Amino acid sequence: MSRVAIVSGGGRGIGAAVCRKLADRFRAIGVIDRDRDPAEQVAAELRAAGRVAEVRVVDVTNVDAVGQAVDSLVAEMGGLDTVVAAAGNQVGADLADMSVAVWSTVLDVHLTGSFALVRASLPALRKSANPSVVLIASIAARGIAGHANYGAAKAGIMGLTRSLARELGPEGIRVNAVAPGFIDTRMTRDGAGRRRLSWEEFAGAAAAASALGRIGQPEEVASVVDFLASSDSSYMTGQIVYATGGP
């Protein structure tokens, strides 16, 4: 077990679940998050499981800071094999009321953050025997009222995934994405409040719309990420894998 991964947004939600799942295959995981306490808590869990875990507190929209964090993690952990861009946010408004700042902050976190992480990781990934990149898209790319910025950002992640797969494929670097549906995370729970609904109402409506009749858990998304990061998916690149509980 010699592989090394870096996960942005690794302190909470899907990112934290990804860190825990990758610990089954990876000896070292770099946890990038803008908040130190949750990132350190995840790192402590990984260390308790016998893994190397390093934390960097970074705003992923700061491209220079992302580059410095990746460089230091690669140097400290001894290489890099997989990068997972799981940092995300969701700030919505109807289009008529959406400020440029609200529009930009969501695109910057999702798109610029993913771009910055992958670009900074390229030199190390090129040295890996099995390099892979996994981005986090969303079913919201199909359209989501009141969150045009989020839907656009996630559609952009899909385009970024396919573009990078074509660009980096000749070097053996695979790039795929997971598109979750309604997942029980803090961000999703915050969405209930923004809609002035109880969590039970919000989650219940989502469950009723799912073919499986329930909402998803972060661990279920993490399992798909783990598959895409592994050699089990060695002939997959440029793919968007939906984990939505339905078609």
Image (cartoon, rainbow, N blue to C red):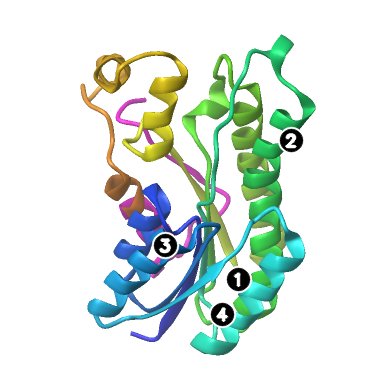
The residue that disc 3 covers is 37
Report the magenta residues as a range. 223-247
Q: Amino acid at mark 1?
A: Gly
Q: Amino acid at mark 2?
A: Ser
Q: Amino acid at mark 4?
A: Leu
The residue that disc 4 covers is 73
* Helix, strand or loop under label 4: helix
* Helix, strand or loop under label 3: helix
Q: Nearer the viewer, residue 165 or 70?
A: 70
Cα distance in 3D space between marks 3 and 1: 36 Å
The residue that disc 2 covers is 104
* Helix, strand or loop under label 1: loop
Q: Nearer the viewer, residue 161 or 151?
A: 151
Of the two numbered discs 2 and 3 in the rendering, the one whose residue sits closer to the viewer? 3
**Compared to 50, does 209 lie above or below?**
above
The image shows residue 65 at horizontal and vertical percentages of: 70, 67
Of the two numbered discs 2 and 1 in the rendering, the one whose residue sits closer to the viewer? 2
- Counting other residues with Cα less than 10 Å from the Cα at mark 4, is it few (<14), some (14-19), or many (20 or more)? many
Q: Specify whether residue 232 is painted magenta.
A: yes
Going 57% across and 28% down the picture, which residue do you hit? 141
Going 62% across and 49% down the picture, which residue do you hit? 161
Residue 227 visible at all: no
Q: Please identify the quadrant where the C terminus is shown.
A: top left
Q: Specify whether residue 61 is painted magenta.
A: no
The image shows residue 77 at horizontal and vertical percentages of: 49, 86
**Compared to 55, does 142 lie above or below?**
above
Residue 55 visible at all: yes
Disc assigned to residue 172: 1
